[in-house]
Amino acid sequence: MLDAHAHLSFKKFNRDREEIIARCRRAGLSVVDCAVTQATLAKSLELSQQYEFIYTTAGIHPYKAARLEKSAVEAMLERIEKSIDQLVALGEAGLDYHLDRENVQRQKEVFEAVATLAKEHSLPLVVHAREAEEEALRMLLNLEVEKALFHCYGGSVETAMRILESGYSISLATNLCFSDHQQSLARALPLESIILETDSPYLSPIKGEKRNQPVFIFASVEKLAELKGVAEEKVRSTASANARRFYGI
Ligand SMILES: [Zn+2]
């Protein structure tokens, strides 16, 4: 199984990262770790060098886009380019009108910069779009980005269908386990196009466990199998194959 998006390199795992990773190993779970700062990129590269089942992507979160000096954005882009051979994708990058409606223009500029870098290096792009899915899709099509994954997708079914028709991908996070909207998306989308992720440390599906972790992805597998009326094994193999195809791993 593959967790298509997590942040193991975040500080929240400093205390027990090795143990969390050991659990992944025991569960036969690979993880795509998403770095969004210079510090998390350094940590993530360390992890993907150390563990053959951890992979790194790197980008700039849209919430940070307007909060970073232009020079800091430039420095991060340079750092990303320096590590490009060790990355399986770029991102997350995108638009978040839920967290920040004030700095739309700056978000777009940074999104475009990361998307352009992905294009230049023929790498897939992990997209964060919240309350801005349509706009992000429009930009990807305009920029002629070839491979993009709308991670932690929470938009409408209609937009989801348009994303898939455009040849892009969608992943559902572990909020699938408790959100009616996510469950209606899961019912509407064909299993052959669903990718699963935890977005750890966020969106824990387990009551009493505030911090999410990659092995909790199996709660999503169980839920999706129930919603689709298929065996868990079928969900595991299909969602993993979809994610591996996207990342080329
Ligand atoms: Zn994320």
Image (tube, helix red, strand yellow):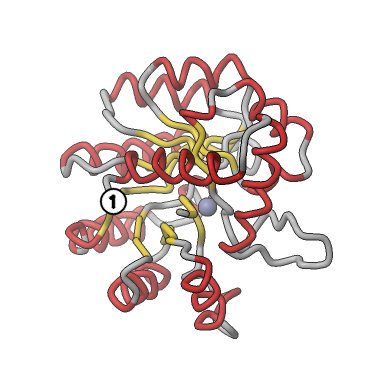
Provide residue 50's location: percent of width, then percent of height: 32, 78
Task: List x then y, in percent, for residue 118.
Answer: 25, 42
Q: Residue at x 66, y 63 (%)?
A: 212
Q: Is residue 83 above or below residue 234?
A: below
Question: In the figure, is residue 62 to the left or right of 189?
Answer: left
Q: Residues within 10 Å of mark 1 (few under 14, many from 20)?
A: few
Residue 182 placement: quadrant: top right
Q: Can you give x and y, in whole percent of width and height, for residue 167 in the image?
A: 35, 22
* Type of amino acid at the residue the image marks with label 1: Ile
Q: Residue furthest right?
A: 208
Tell me: residue 164, above or below residue 47.
Answer: above
SS assignment at label 1: loop
Q: Quadrant of residue 86?
A: bottom left
Question: In the figure, is residue 131 to the left or right of 148?
Answer: right
Q: Residue at horizontal 68%, vertical 46%?
A: 222
**Which residue is found at the position 78% from the left and 44% from the top?**
178
Task: Determine which residue is flagged by label 1.
Answer: 249
In the rendered image, residue 53, in percent from the top left (x then y), is placed at 36, 66
Instruction: Give the residue displayed 55% in from the left and 45% down from the top.
Output: 233
The one of 240 and 116 positioned closer to us in this rendering: 240
* Quadrant of res 121: top left
